[in-house]
Amino acid sequence: MCKEESQQKNSISKQLKLFTLRGEPVANGDGGTIIIHETGAELSSRLDQQRILTENILTKIVDYGNLNRAYQQVSSNNGSGGVDGMDVSELRQWLGQHLNELQESILNETYQVNAVRKVEIPKPNGGIRTLGIPTVKDRLIQQAIHQELNRYYEPHFSECSFGFRSGRNAQQAILQASTFVAEGKEWVVDIDLENFFDTINHDRLMHRLRKGIGDKRLLRLINGYLQTGIMTGGLIEQRTAGTPQGSPLSPLLSNIVLDELDKELERRGHSFCRYADDSNVFCQ
């Protein structure tokens, strides 16, 4: 009986570990602790549950409270208008007259995504950075999507990821890097993904989103934002890859894509810091 009880306790202990959050310290039985990372099976199970929880998430996205928070964020960011000429100062009045219409058009999938306005700005180290500026209405919708999806994805991003995340910044990434160097890891592999935002594969991104999002209406809306053209000189150029910088949704989508890289680096036991599309791996 004692042996059976011991085996049962070990079995229960193993099962409980499956529900331990990634990165959470767990006693190892020898007086110390270990860090549990998600296995492939755990990740698959979590995404299956997330897909069930998000089967009707578009309703939450267009909820008045969520849209109001999105409006406050878009309004505080200000910024220039898009291809329709409406600026942020006009958005409040427009919403007062068309909010219900906007909500219904999103839910019944009749909302028409607008092209983004092309803006080119010089990079500090030379070259040109291309921005795609959505209309203020599309910025509102994308911000509302970001707010709801972020609740599901943010808690599971890597502790070594610092870009485009609430409560995280470049200074923290530098501090983490300094810690690795102080540990004697003075060899640094610098990874800079060239033109990352402009070359994200749409099919691969949508495949990853389908694993964790159950609302097909939302998936089609996001795909619409990915596929929308970019306007320059009055002409619309269709895009087959990339997610435009300047879009409220792009930072979250980029972290969802690059989280796959983070998880692989974690699996291999590397010390690293990632900020957006720049990564440093620190080695002995």
Image: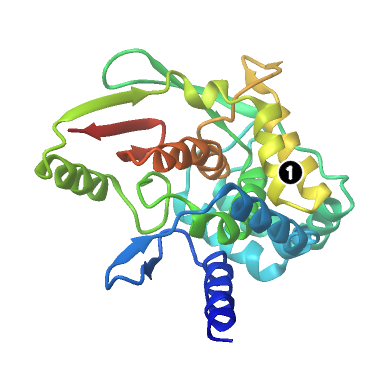
**Viewer-proximal residue among 169 and 183:** 183
Residue at 70% x, 55% y: name it. 94
> Along the line of sight, which residue is nearer the eye, 71 or 129?
129
User: Would residue 99 be seen by someone viewing this image from the given angle?
Assistant: no
Instruction: Classify residue 46 as left or right of residue 112.
Output: left
Q: Quadrant of residue 9?
A: bottom right
Q: Residues within 10 Å of mark 1 (few under 14, many from 20)?
A: some
Q: Looking at the picture, how far across and down is residue 184, in whole percent?
A: 11, 39
On screen, residue 116 above or below 195 = below
Q: What colour scheme has been applied to the protein in the rendered image?
A: rainbow
| Image position, residue 183 (x, y; %) | 12, 44
Residue 167 image offset from top left, x and y in percent: 36, 59
Which of the 4 image quarters holds residue 232? top right
Give the residue pinned by disc 1. Answer: 210
Residue visible at 63% across and 60% down in the picture: 148
Instruction: Tell which of 248 and 178 is nearer to you.
Output: 178
Relative horizontal placement of residue 95, taking residue 275 as reference (left or right): right
Report whether 168 appears left or right of 227: left
Taking 266 as reference, is 45 above or below it?
below
**Residue 160 shows in this picture:** yes
On the rendered image, what quadrant is the N terminus found in?
bottom right
In terms of depth relative to the viewer, which is nearer, 262 or 84?
A: 262
Residue in view at x 82 percent, y 48 percent: 216
Q: Secondary structure at mark 1?
A: helix
| Residue 196 horizontal/vertical position (percent) | 48, 24
Q: Quadrant of the C terminus?
A: top left
- Look at label 1 and name its amino acid: Arg
221 in relation to 198, above or below: below
